[in-house]
Structures are given as C-alpha cells and as structure tokens.
Image (spheres, rainbow, N blue to C red):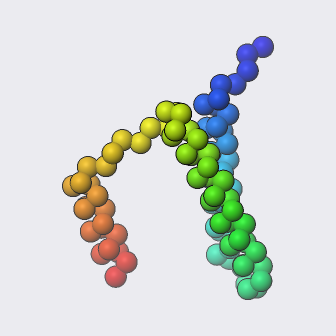
Amino acid sequence: MQGFTDKEILGDGLSTQKATTEKFNTFAGECVHDSLRDTMMNILEQEHGITTEVFNMMHQRGMYETPPAEEKKIMEAKQKFSQSAK
C-alpha cells in the first residue's frame, strides 16, 4: 500500500481550506444578525490564517511555485481594478 506524498497531503489541505473560506465568506455575507456575522467573520479570519500557513509551507518547500509578476501585468491589474471600484 502506497501512502500519500507531503505535496498531496498539503495540496489537499490547501484545497480544503480554500473551500472552507469560501463557505464562511458566503455565510458571513448572508447573516442577518450582527452577533452571528461577527462570529462568522472571526472564524473566516482564522481560516484565512490557516490557508496562508498551508500555502506558505507548500511555497517554501517548492511545492507551489509562484513566478514573479511582470511589471506590465501588475500595472494592468491595478488599472483594471481601480476602474471597477469606481
């Protein structure tokens, strides 16, 4: 029987965290009661922290490479999102 690699385990964990934060974000956005929304937001913040930890582990081990962004693409993204925010 073959076990899972560290990359597979961490990748599964990262996928799970992404799905979890997506659900808590939806729940927080749809809460009618302020105290429940605050609780959902606190949980969401904690879940984002876990997601970041797993991502950083993978990135530091070379399991999730992120190539440097080209300056041109950075400027295009800034322009695109600053226009949509207006």
Question: How far from the left and from the top, in percent, is residue 22?
Answer: 63, 60
Question: From this viewpoint, which residue is outermost toward the left?
Answer: 72
Indicate whether 64 appears above or below 24. Answer: above
- Left or right for 85, reference 63: left
- Left or right for 82, reference 62: left
Question: How far from the left and from the top, in percent, is residue 5?
Answer: 65, 25
How many numbered marks, from 0 up?
Answer: 0
Indicate whether 77 appears above or below 36. Answer: above
Question: From this viewpoint, which residue is outermost toward the front?
Answer: 60
Quarter of the image for residue 80 reads bottom left
Indicate whether 56 appears above or below 8. Answer: below
Question: How far from the left and from the top, in percent, is residue 65?
Answer: 44, 38
Question: How far from the left and from the top, in percent, is residue 29?
Answer: 64, 75
Residue sitting at x 78%, y 13%? 1
- Left or right for 5, reference 56: right
Residue sitting at x 63%, y 58%? 49
Mark yes or no: residue 54 visible: yes
Mark yes or no: residue 15 visible: no
